[in-house]
Image (cartoon, rainbow, N blue to C red):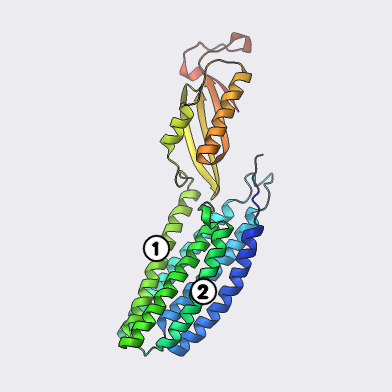
């Protein structure tokens, strides 16, 4: 059993703080949105509600990911964070389509908007969401590795940008009196939500379908293995992600008919290369050789591909 347990104390604390701040801001957005008759502020409330659920799911996922592996979950709970990120992203897509519907309805029946309330509430949102984004970035989002924390970070960055746009829109409404700007801002926020949501959906599905990890090119991995002294051939090469930060690889490597003490050096070099260059920690490498020693009980003629003696490590 080979398990990596990541400490989640930092992200847990940040996520708990973010949950409290986001909940308070949602209440403010709803109250201000109703008072100002602003669809943009109510859209922001919906956006932040999805963020609240996203942060809550991320907190649960961080807890599950920190649990050790067991006899029934031999890789631990690494994919709990991936599943949380997928649910977050799907919720974002649903929220964006709801915003598009409301914006279209508001364009047909414009309502007077209190632009000054829009601007003040949005300014508070920029400060709050910006602070949360910075905390998430420092707690693990900067590496771009954990898709769960990164999805929460994308939520908050999107909120910061969209609330900044609401400030600008409120000022334009205040100056020109054009009420359609509120609906246009809502559509812009919806597009931003949709874009970030689809990106996370694509990546999480790639992990769940055991596709090649983001940023890894299989041909480069194969070339790096072939370049190691003692490696004659590489085939049946597979690389996938167990979780957002845990990569796995399996392959067959052809080597000369050498003693185990020598092949151990080749195995160590291959593992070091994969870890240093591609951040691949979990490996299943099977050695093969054409030569067959009679002393070991081999009775299959040398040279038949079906009769290769396999030594698994």
Query: Where's residue 232, x and y in %?
Result: 47, 21
Mark 1–mark 2 contact, CB under 8 Å? Answer: no
Element type at mark 2: helix
Is 146 located above or below residue 313 in the figure? below
Of tags 1 and 2, the one toward the viewer is: 2
Q: Is residue 49 visible?
A: no
Residue at 39%, 75% in the rendered image: 165
Q: Residues within 10 Å of mark 2 (few under 14, many from 20)?
A: some
Mark 1–mark 2 Cα distance, whole angstroms, equals: 23 Å
Checking the image for residue 13, the label placed there is: none
Specify whether 299 is left or right of 237. right
Q: Quadrant of residue 21?
A: bottom right
Is 220 located above or below residue 301 in the figure? below
Element type at mark 1: helix
Is 86 located above or below residue 300 in the figure? below
Query: Where's residue 159, x and y in %?
Result: 47, 70
Q: Quadrant of residue 18?
A: bottom right
Residue at 51%, 74% in the rendered image: 127
Q: Please tell me which of labels 1 and 2 falls first in the chain.
A: 2
- The one nearer the camera, 51 or 310, is 51
Specify whether 152 is left or right of 116. right
Is 48 located above or below residue 296 in the figure? below
Specify whether 57 is left or right of 89. right
Residue at 34%, 82% in the rendered image: 172
Residue furthest to the top in view is: 294
Query: Where's residue 305, x and y in %?
Result: 46, 18
Kindly identify which residue carries mark 1: 195
Q: Quadrant of the image for the C terminus? A: top right
Q: Quadrant of the image for the N terminus? A: top right
Checking the image for residue 127, the label placed there is: 2
């Amino acid at each position: 059993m080979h398990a990596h347990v990541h400490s989640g104390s930092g992200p847990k604390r940040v996520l708990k703080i973010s949950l409290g701040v986001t909940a308070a801001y949602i209440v403010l957005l709803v109250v201000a949105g109703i008072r100002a008759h602003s669809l943009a502020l109510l859209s922001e409330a919906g956006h932040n509600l999805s963020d609240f659920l996203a942060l809550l799911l991320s907190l649960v996922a961080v807890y599950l990911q920190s649990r050790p592996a067991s006899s029934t979950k031999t890789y631990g709970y690494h994919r709990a964070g991936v599943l949380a990120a997928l649910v977050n992203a799907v919720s974002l897509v649903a929220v964006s389509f709801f915003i598009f519907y409301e914006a279209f309805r508001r364009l047909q029946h414009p309502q007077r908007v209190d632009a000054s309330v829009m601007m003040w509430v949005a300014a508070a949102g920029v400060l709050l969401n910006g602070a949360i984004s910075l905390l998430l970035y420092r707690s693990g989002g900067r590496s771009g590795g954990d898709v769960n924390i990164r999805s929460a970070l994308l939520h908050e960055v999107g909120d910061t940008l969209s609330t900044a746009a609401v400030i600008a829109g409120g000022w334009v409404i205040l100056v020109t009196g054009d009420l359609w700007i509120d609906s246009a801002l809502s559509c812009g926020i919806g597009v931003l939500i949709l874009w970030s949501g689809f990106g996370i959906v694509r990546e999480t599905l790639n992990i769940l379908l055991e596709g090649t990890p983001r940023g890894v090119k299989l041909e480069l991995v194969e070339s790096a293995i072939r370049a190691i002294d003692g490696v004659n051939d590489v085939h049946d090469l597979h690389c996938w992600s167990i979780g957002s930060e845990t990569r796995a690889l399996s392959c067959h490597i052809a080597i000369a008919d050498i003693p185990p003490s020598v092949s151990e050096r080749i195995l160590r070099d291959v593992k070091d290369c994969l870890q240093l260059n591609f951040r691949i920690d979990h490996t299943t490498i099977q050695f093969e050789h054409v030569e067959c020693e009679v002393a070991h009980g081999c009775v299959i003629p040398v040279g038949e591909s079906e009769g290769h003696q396999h030594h698994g490590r």
